[in-house]
Image (tube, rainbow, N blue to C red):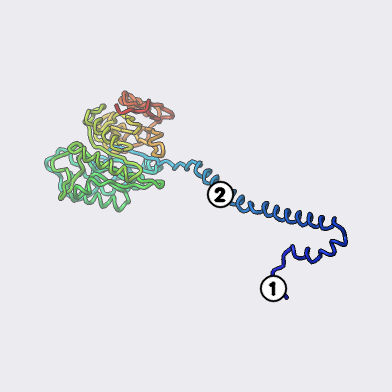
């Protein structure tokens, strides 16, 4: 048997005598049939061959469409952080007497649930929490709160407190150490004071809803010997080195989602701000702060929107014995921090009882506090709408900073 491949033309040649016997038409029909068969085979191949390429092209196009559709989907907005901020708190004098009689949670018991409802709660701790130390003989007013006062702060779920104020070293470094230890044990963060300048100027870092907040605390009220140094305890100063303050804020804004700054400043018992307060607040916002939350005057001062950010020039006394109508007025400032910045700003009015313990007020008492807050906020780009004894505060226009 031959191993040579068989070709279609060879059988035709072997059957040539038969074609001659059957006449000329049969070879012609055979030739036509063979040609048609070849054409059909080739045609089928030409039809089938593009199919893989077409399938591949469709798959690629589907992939492109999928990616395009995915890129067109807007990112899910993050849940905003709710913040509650309050003013000065002491746990000495009349407030201390209340603690002695009713326990450490008593001063804040009427507002604890309101404060704890926020994701983040901050305020100024005006007195240390200690039973140690020696009173500063050079000061007329010295404060040292009961250690048990930490119970009220914990029950109210304070996230952090500011310590940069003019009473932090009233009883020396021992009382400050006790305060920091008590706060640390309770899981309450702190800023504005420490055993060195590095500790005093360090931010408290707060985490809430997968976001981070850097909380800073500074004081413009600087008793002699109170400012921390590299080797001595004390508080963080603002007015003596605002360049350092703004540089710190700018750096933190690059690392964390939000920056809150507390200043202890202003003139006591004065309703209206002084120039330095405005200059420092605006500088802090320009540097990257989202809100300035301040205290010290013992009365409330105006609320301003600057560059669409929030400034509370004085939140008033929140836990503090008092001797006049105005010093007993305060409020809980609440707002949201989110993708749109600072929004949903409200002020819930409070008033202090004879011991200096706050309670939320309604009716005429609420109207008196909120109306005065609106009055002293005139010219600060703030619009007030009072609904159900709560002031809803928003910017009148978008600030230009000019």
Q: Where 270 sits versus 255, above or below?
A: above
Identify the residue at horizontal 23%, vertical 51% (top origin).
178
Judged from this view, the residue extending furthest toward the right is: 22
Left or right for 156, reference 230: right
Query: Image check: 124 left or right of 141?
Result: right
- Name which quarter of the figure residue 86 lies in: top left
Residue 123 rendering spot, x and y as whole percentages: 30, 41
Is residue 69 in view?
Answer: yes
Question: As rendered, which of 272 and 93 lies closer to the eye?
Answer: 272
Q: Nearer the viewer, residue 218 or 350?
A: 218
Please state the horizontal and vertical placement of residue 140, each as a whole percent of the image.
15, 38
Q: Earlier in the sequence, mark 1 or mark 2?
A: 1
Within 10 Å of disc 2 (Cα), the crowding (few <14, some 14-19, many 20+) is few
For label 2, the SS is helix
Residue 179 rendering spot, x and y as whole percentages:
24, 49
Position of 270 with respect to 36 (left or right) is: left
Front residue of 47/322: it is 47
Circle 2 is placed at which residue position? 60
Q: Which mark is residue 85?
A: none
- At horizontal 61% and vertical 51% (from top left) the residue drawn is 55
Tell me where residue 6 appears, x and y as whole percent: 72, 67
Q: Relative to 353, is 60 above or below?
A: below
Residue drawn at x 74%, y 62% is 9
Q: Which mark is residue 3?
A: 1
Could you tell me which residue is drawn at 21 percent across and 41 percent down?
A: 244
Circle 1 packing at 10 Å, graded few (<14), some (14-19), many (20+), is: few
Tell me if label 1 and label 2 are in contact, CB under 8 Å: no
């Amino acid at each position: 048997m031959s191993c040579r491949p068989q070709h279609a033309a060879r059988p035709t040649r072997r059957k040539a005598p038969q074609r001659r016997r059957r006449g000329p038409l049969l070879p012609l029909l055979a030739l036509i049939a063979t040609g048609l068969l070849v054409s059909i085979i080739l045609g089928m191949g030409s039809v089938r061959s593009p199919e893989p390429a077409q399938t591949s092209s469709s798959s690629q196009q589907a992939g492109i469409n999928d990616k395009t559709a995915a890129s067109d989907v807007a990112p899910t907005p993050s849940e905003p952080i709710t913040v509650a901020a309050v003013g000065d708190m002491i746990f000495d004098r009349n407030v201390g007497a209340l603690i002695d009689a009713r326990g450490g949670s008593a001063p804040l018991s009427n507002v604890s649930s309101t404060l704890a409802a926020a994701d983040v709660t901050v305020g100024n701790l005006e007195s240390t929490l200690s039973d140690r130390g020696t009173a500063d003989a050079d000061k007329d007013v010295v404060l040292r709160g009961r250690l048990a006062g930490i119970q009220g702060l914990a029950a109210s779920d304070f996230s952090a407190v500011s310590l940069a104020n003019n009473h932090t070293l009233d009883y020396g470094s021992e009382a400050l150490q006790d305060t920091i230890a008590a706060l640390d044990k309770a899981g309450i963060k702190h800023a504005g004071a420490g055993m060195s300048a590095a500790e005093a100027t360090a931010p408290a870092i707060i985490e809430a809803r997968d976001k981070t907040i850097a909380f800073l605390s500074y004081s413009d009220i600087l008793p002699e010997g109170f400012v921390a140094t590299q080797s001595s305890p004390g508080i963080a100063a603002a007015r003596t080195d605002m360049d350092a303050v703004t540089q710190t804020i700018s750096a933190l804004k690059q690392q964390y989602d939000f920056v809150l700054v507390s200043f202890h400043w202003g003139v006591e018992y004065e309703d209206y701000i002084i120039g330095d307060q405005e200059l420092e607040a605006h500088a802090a916002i320009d540097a990257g702060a989202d809100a300035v939350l301040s205290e010290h005057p013992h009365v409330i001062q105006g609320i301003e929107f600057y560059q669409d950010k929030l400034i509370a020039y004085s939140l008033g006394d929140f836990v503090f014995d008092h001797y006049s109508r105005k010093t007993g007025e305060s409020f809980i400032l609440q707002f949201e921090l989110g993708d749109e910045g600072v929004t949903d700003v409200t002020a819930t009015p409070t008033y202090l009882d004879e011991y200096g313990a706050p309670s939320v007020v309604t009716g005429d008492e609420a109207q008196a506090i909120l109306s005065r807050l609106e009055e002293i906020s005139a010219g600060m780009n703030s619009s007030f709408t009072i609904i159900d004894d709560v002031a809803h505060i928003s910017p009148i226009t978008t600030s230009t900073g000019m």
